[in-house]
Image: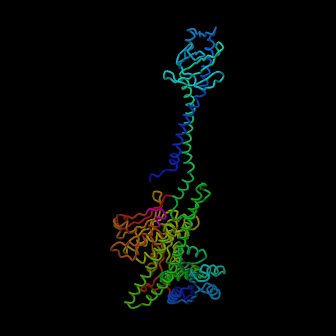
Amino acid sequence: MIGRVRVLIVEDDAALASGIARILEGEGHAVDVMAKGEQAVLGARQERFDLIILDVGLPGIDGFEVLRRLRAAGDRTPVLVLTARDALDDRVHGLDLGADDYMAKPFAMPELAARVRALVRRSQAQTGPKIVHGPLVLDTLARRATLNGAPLDLAAREWAVLEVLLARVEKIVSKEAIIQAVASWGEELTPNAIEVYVSRLRAKLDGAGIKIRTVRGFGYMLEEYREVGAEGAPAGS
Amino acid sequence: MTTRRTLRSHLLRLLLPPVAVLLVLGTVGAYYLALDPANEAYDQALIDVAIALGERIRGDDGKLAFDLPGAAEQVLRTDRYDTIYYLVRNPDGSRLAGDSGLPPPPHGAEPEDGVIAYDGLYHEQALRLVALLVPCGGRICTVQVAETTKKRRALASDIALAGVVPSAVITLLLLGLVWFGVKRGLTPLEDLSREIRARSARDLQPIDPARAPEEALPLVAALNQLFGRVGEASANQQRFLANAAHQLRTPLAGLQAHTELALSHDPPAEQRAQLEQLRTATIRTARLANQLLALARAEPGGARADAVATVNLRSVVEDAADEWVHRAMAKEIDLGFELADAPVAGDALLLREALGNLIHNALEYSPPGARVTVRTGVRNQHPFLEVEDDGPGIPPAERERVLERFYRMAGTAGTGSGLGLSIVREIAVAHRAEIEIGAGEAGRGCRLGLTFPHG
């Protein structure tokens, strides 16, 4: 459950900006729209936003320059870059400059909404001790987990695997990445072992509607939590 | 190949006739030049004989006599090769002794040291003669000695031949040198052609003039100028396309945003259907814009030669997996991976585009519940990338045609533009990769793959 957040949209195309704004407002967020890069740099300095959605192709200073100036000023606000240019080049450039995520135009609104939720969740998880995913709450300080309010018993390895998946909801996490994150130094973990932990986690979480999907030959993906009977509705709103 | 003349054979054809004529003329000339020294040497022998004969003339009381013993005459006339004749004439020219009828010296010939040497005919044989003027009884007698020219001709031939053989050998060596020299001289040109042949159509880098021979510099300069112009033209085209695609994508994103926004407000069923149509059309238009751009980029002169690097196909798939897994999930298709390292020299952006089109194609034509598998690796030393599905497959007769632009198989339900696979083909061509279309495992479904050149 992510709360109401403040989002700054920096996009010079009025139709697209208003479309994104209305979708995010529909999710309960407070939205500001700016059309110019200079304006955005000033705005972000004066007020605190939880997320900035930044178009690359702005008149005046472009989105990359805005991002560079924000990061140079020590602003760590999560930034989702939008670009209409060739996907790969801009993505690499944007991520190098410190963007947190990237989307190529045009995009589906539900996907944008999901990315916004993931970014906000991630930045909140970094600041707070609790990771919340639908009915599942992981208290990383007390190392206690609850499911629908009831204590959930997780072995250390299960906890570690779940934490990796929770950090990247809706993203595929390769088995190798999980092994790297879970194995202690000098320890050998096989992909088979990861499969065992994941199947145990599934046994514990599946009943509560938390789904870990297998991506054949690649790894796993923790699906976004959807409340039963509210298919398609955004979680956490 | 046409029967175009090579520079070498052209040069040889040009050189061979005059060299042959010169060789023949030289030989003939040497023969005649050699006759003079041969004559001089043998003439001296004849003169010696004439002097000896002259001493045999006795001139007592006005009556001249010639006294040559038979044995001496025998010795005189003996020669291994030639026949020797002599004639001693009285001052009045009448015969005193010897063979009558020897031709007299030509009129007006000036004696040199009392000797006239000349050529003549006797009994239809060519003769060399000397006439010696000898004092006899207060007057002048003439002693003529002659011999046939057999040994003289033999000597001249020997001298001429001795000259001909080395000249012929030298000539042959010279022609050989021309043959190999031209080949060797043209080696830099051949290297140059090989370098240009080996280029991909996308490589418009100028040729380094330092590596071309001096004579080829104008050609290299002209080629570089052409490369430059082609590169500039294609860069302009790329800029235009990138701008066009950019300008299209933003309003399309706005259109899609508002359509989806309207859809999220629970519109009445009839409007919902219309909005869905609008949304589908928007997505297709956006995809088409992307594909046209990709196609232009993949074409020769796409001017992305600078983007060529070693690319691991496995990483290309891993980077794009997320996006495609979500799309597969939306269609309830099981998208899986069998990935091994597969390094190729290529353009990561284009390879990603090719992969995207292959996966898109498989997802588009596979029913819910289908399995789609993406594979990378190295097979028989060739890196490969393939996407296999267990959908309806492509009949063998259609396999070539699906690679054509805008071709869509009859009876297919997909919303594709028919450009996807032709983009894959263009990208394959740009990477010198083979494109294969076959049936999937157990003969079901479709397997589309790219096999890249070794190394």
**In-front residue for pair B93/A188:** B93
Which color mode does the image show? Answer: rainbow
Residue A44 in which image quadrant: bottom right
Q: Is residue B428 magenta?
A: yes
Image x and y of residue A40, in percent = 61, 86
Q: Is residue B358 left or right of residue B137?
A: left
Residue B51 visible to an observer of this rendering: yes
Residue B338 in which image quadrant: bottom left
Extent of the magenta region: B427-434
In the rendered picture of this protein, how many numbered marks are placed on residues? 0
Image x and y of residue B400, in percent = 38, 65
**In-front residue for pair B251/B349:** B251
Residue B405 in which image quadrant: bottom left
Name above or below for residue A191 compared with residue B259: above
Q: Residue at x 54, y 34 (%)?
A: B28
Image x and y of residue B438, in percent = 38, 64
Name above or below for residue B114 compared with residue A40: above
Image x and y of residue B157, in percent = 54, 28
Q: Is residue B174 magenta?
A: no
